[in-house]
Every structure is written in structure tokens, then in C-alpha cells.
Amino acid sequence: MSDQDLRIERVTKSFGDFRAVAELDLTIPDGSFFAIIGASGCGKTTTLRMIAGLEQPTTGRIMLGEQDITALRPYRRPINTVFQSYALFPHMTVEDNVSYGLRRKGIGRTAARHQAHQMLKLVQLEGFETRKPAQLSGGQQQRVALARALVNHPEVLLLDEPLGALDLKLRRQMQLELKRLQTEVGITFVHITHDQEEAMSMADTVAVMNGGRLEQSGAPQDIYDYPATEFVANFLGQTNLIEATVTGSGDEVTIDAQGHRLAVPQRRCRVSSGTAALGIRPEKVGLASDPDQVPDGRAHLTGVVTDAIFLGVSTQYLVRSAWGQELCALVPNTGPGSVVAPGSPIAVHWHPEHAFLLGRS
């Protein structure tokens, strides 16, 4: 743990009878790109506002290193925020917007101007100093907002859905820019978003919230490959979840999944008894026209193709199982292979190492 880690310790925030955040414990490593994600109303924005000092926790505390910042006013915290709306001053030039915070601190005009120019160079907006916000595109306005926040050299930068107002192509460009910027400046970024792909493509660590509580946190690949709950499995991409019952445990946990005896490696299981949900990501699923063609060592179920949807890099197949559940498979379009027609019988197969077993929610 670094001396300047940001720690949220048993924080609860209530608004009357409504508990927006419940006993939240999070450690955000110093210098990391950390994302908090979840659906609308999960408590992520309330958490950001408490870190910023715009809301006070009902209970618990917020620490920055060894300093308790829970009761500090926002302007006393070494923390800046970039909002989705950018909140630029429309009557000021780009240079004046960026240098505004420095001038408020009493830094001279020449020094403030020099620092503003350095920061505009960092966000690749050299030559835009004299323009007004209305003369800029959405992506350029967002860069100005970032420069204005970073020029004050905060220890933590909070990003409140900063890419939400941008179109898809520009949003993806800015995801790369934000990651590059965070790596260059080395400041802790805390990014709040409901877009799981955005979070997973940028963050070192992702925390998933649901109903005011933390469901799971960890490296994006870890929580995608081995989610802790059904909510996380469904929120981070697509998942096939099949109701099952555990029938035996050991190095492999055996299950009965809708009348099919299957096995999952013990290290891929969150439960070892009772009812469960067997999870397989669609891109981990293969298809075979006949069960006899399923490669050795792979588990499989049979069904009938109900739809084939061309997605460019892959084709999404929907397969109706014998018990009526529709399973999804994403098959890469790597060659001139033929599309399996709807109505065709099919075997859905996967490597047991790619499955996971969860407790039922």
C-alpha cells in the first residue's frame, strides 16, 4: 500500500430512508487508473461526490494517505473533478479557462500562462489558446476541461462520465487519450461510468457496484473471466448462465445442469454445494454440427440454431436448448466458412477451464 493511496473505509451515505451507498470499502492505489462502474442508481456518482467533498458520508471515513479528508471542504482537498458537461467558462478563452485555477491561487499571469501552455501541449491543443469553448468540438472541449483540472497538479483526478456526451468514434479515441494522459502524468484517476467496455479498456482496476454495495473489484480480465456474482457476470458483457445443482466436489466440482452431468475445475467455482449457475462466455463457446465432432476434453450441450447474426468480426448464434433456454455463441469470422442456418441441430461446446460456477442470486 502506497503512502498516498485513496481509501474509502466503511462508508455509508443515506438520504432520509434511502441508502445510496452501504458500508463501502475500497482502496484506490496511488497513481492508478481506477474505474467504478454500475447501472444508474448503483451509488457510483454518490461515491465520487463524497470523494470530491460535495457530499458528506453518513458514516465511515475517506483517507488520502494518512490524512483524513472526510470533513475537508472541496477546495481544501488535493482533488479535482472533470464532469460530463465540462463546465467551461463560455466567455473565457481556452488559455484563461485552463489558467483560472492557478490565478485563483495567486500565481502570476506570466507563470500561469506558461503552465497553461504546457498543459495544453500535453493534451495536444497547442494553437487553441485564444479560442472560446463554443469554437471547439466536443472532444476538444473535453481536453480543455482535463487540462484545467490537471494544471493544478491534483493528487487525484475524478472523472464523472467524461465521455458520455461524445459520439462513439470520438469516445473511443478519447479513451486512448485518457489512458495515455494518465500514464504520462502519473496521477490517480478515478473514473465513474456505466459503460463497462470503456472502463475495462482503460482501467488498471475496476470496481463493480450494485444497489449501493460493492459486488467485486479487481483487474478487468480477472473479474471478466471469473466473476463473483451473477450480477457481475451479466453486467460485464454477455454470459450464458445455466441453472445447475452441485452433485459432488473435489478437484472438479460435478454438477447436474438441466439433466446433463458436467464438471467444472474447483478453482473456477464460487460454490461447492446446493443450487448454482454454470457460466460460459459466448466467445468461449464453439459449435459442432454433430456431438461426435466435439473435440476431446470439451463439455457440450445440444440444441437447435434459432438465429445467426453477422457482426463483422464474428457471427452471433442463438441456440435453443432442449429445456428451452436460448444460449449464445460468438464465432469469429476468420475465413470463408459457411454460416450455420437457423433450424440446424448443433452441439455447443467449451473447455471446462473456461466455465465458472456461481451461487444463485
Image (cartoon, helix red, strand yellow):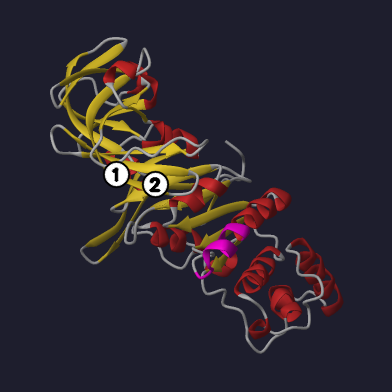
- Point 41% across, 48% down: residue: 310
Give the residues in magenta: 165-173
Please state which amino acid type lies under the numbered disc 1: Phe
Q: Quadrant of the N terminus?
A: top right
- Judged left or right of residue 304, residue 117 is right
Label 1: element kind: helix
Question: Which x, y percent locates residue 123?
Answer: 73, 63
Q: Where 1 sits versus 115, above or below?
A: above
Q: Is residue 197 above or below residue 345?
A: below
Instruction: State the residue position of label 1.
Output: 231
Circle 2: residue type: Val
- Whether the magenta-drawn stretch holds residue 109 is answered as no
Q: Residue at x 53, y 64 (%)?
A: 163
Q: Residue furthest bottom?
A: 91
Q: Residue at x 38, y 21 (%)?
A: 351
Secondary structure under tag 2 reads: strand
List x then y, in percent, for residue 346: 27, 30
Q: Which badge, 2 or 1, comes first in the chain's sequence?
A: 2
Q: Position of residue 329 (x, y in %)?
A: 35, 37
- State the CA–CA distance, disc 2 to disc 1: 9 Å
Q: Residues within 10 Å of mark 1 (few under 14, many from 20)?
A: some
Residue 265 visible at all = no
Residue furthest to the top in view is: 250
- In the figure, is residue 125 to the left or right of 174? right
Quadrant position of residue 207: top left
Asked whether the beta carbons under mark 2 and mark 1 sit within 8 Å of each other, the answer is: yes
Determine which residue is flagged by label 2. 208
Q: Residue 48 versus residue 137: which sits nearer the camera?
A: 137
In depth, the one of 207 and 70 nearer the eye is 207
Closest to the observer, 231 or 36: 231
